[in-house]
Image: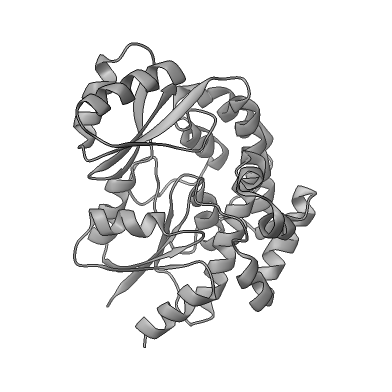
Amino acid sequence: MEKTCFLFAGQGSQYPQMGTELAGHFPEARRIFETGSDILGFDLLKACAEYSAQELAQTEVSQPAIMATSLAAYEAVKSLGILPDMVAGHSLGEYAAMTAAGMLSLEDAFRVIRERARAMGECARHQDGAMYAVLGLSADEVAAVCEKTDGFVIPVNFNSPVQTVIAGEAGAVDRAVAVFAEMGKRTAKLAVSAAFHSKLMQPAADDLKTAIAGIPFAVPTIDFYSNLTGEKMTDFSDMPAYLAKHLVSPVQFVKELKAIQAAGASRFIECGPNKVLTGLVRKTLSGVSYANVEDLKTLEKLKGSSK
């Protein structure tokens, strides 16, 4: 029997007006934004509808806004009668995945993401970090350049066999990028203000662990795959510690996608803004189908392909 994995988008996938169409069409999607607004103390749907790209990119806004849009898309897909057999998210996307898997109530999901965004935003203001995607090289080749570069720069997101993200001190990252340019390889600067998933985020990790210590997490009702190990997660005994470690550890997305396919998934549906993860699935796996849902047009396309 065909198994379906739902994927949830990460930070950087946001864009103005995301999620607004789904919120206008599905009462359950609107409730997600309203719940988020109550917890966050600002109008989340208004932020998505009216903020500029620059305003929406602020960590404290983009993280809950992306999660809300992803969960709204999840509700839209469920309206077609399509349910996941397993879930996974990319970095920030793990929080929407946890919510979809029943690990967090909607209210607690927004409480946790509020603390994560706050801790990361605060940490970013006190560091000079940067991140770049490196295209067209293997992870080992990217790592070799980082190792020879003066200063702190490491591979942090293993996104596809031909895309690895590096992070570190801005100067060191710039030096590594210059080497990739000499090699004739393309790089793309990520619109973030810190070196996410590296040791430079340790203050945020410590802050987050303390801030969410009292929030209850349940065991998931469906299989949940982890960025940290790239495998199905089995130990849910200390989620604050896991999520703190998640902030300072690489995202093993290639390994994760392969493990999900090995577990029987042949259909991947990305819920949330843009279709970044759909592209990574296409570059990493063969013999699978994939689709993204972010608005009514993409939902209709999925409906047509599911008949």
Q: Is residue 270 left or right of residue 265?
A: right
Q: Is residue 7 above or below residue 58?
A: below
- The tally of labels here is 0
Q: Quadrant of residue 307?
A: bottom left
Q: How is the image coloured?
A: one colour
Give the percent coordinates (x, y) of residue 128.
53, 20
Q: Nearer the viewer, residue 203 or 163?
A: 163
Q: Residue furthest top?
A: 150
Q: Is residue 53 above or below residue 197?
A: below
Q: Is residue 269 above or below residue 243?
A: below
Q: Nearer the viewer, residue 89 or 21?
A: 21
Q: Residue at left 56%, top 58%? A: 99
Visible residue check, residue 219: no
Q: Is residue 233 above or below residue 102?
A: above
Give the percent coordinates (x, y) of residue 273.
51, 59
Visible residue check, residue 6: yes
Q: Nearer the viewer, residue 83 or 71?
A: 71
Q: Quadrant of residue 43?
A: bottom right
Q: Quadrant of the N terminus?
A: bottom left
Give the percent coordinates (x, y) of residue 156.
37, 33
Q: Nearer the viewer, residue 4 or 171?
A: 171
Q: Is residue 77 left or right of residue 269?
A: right
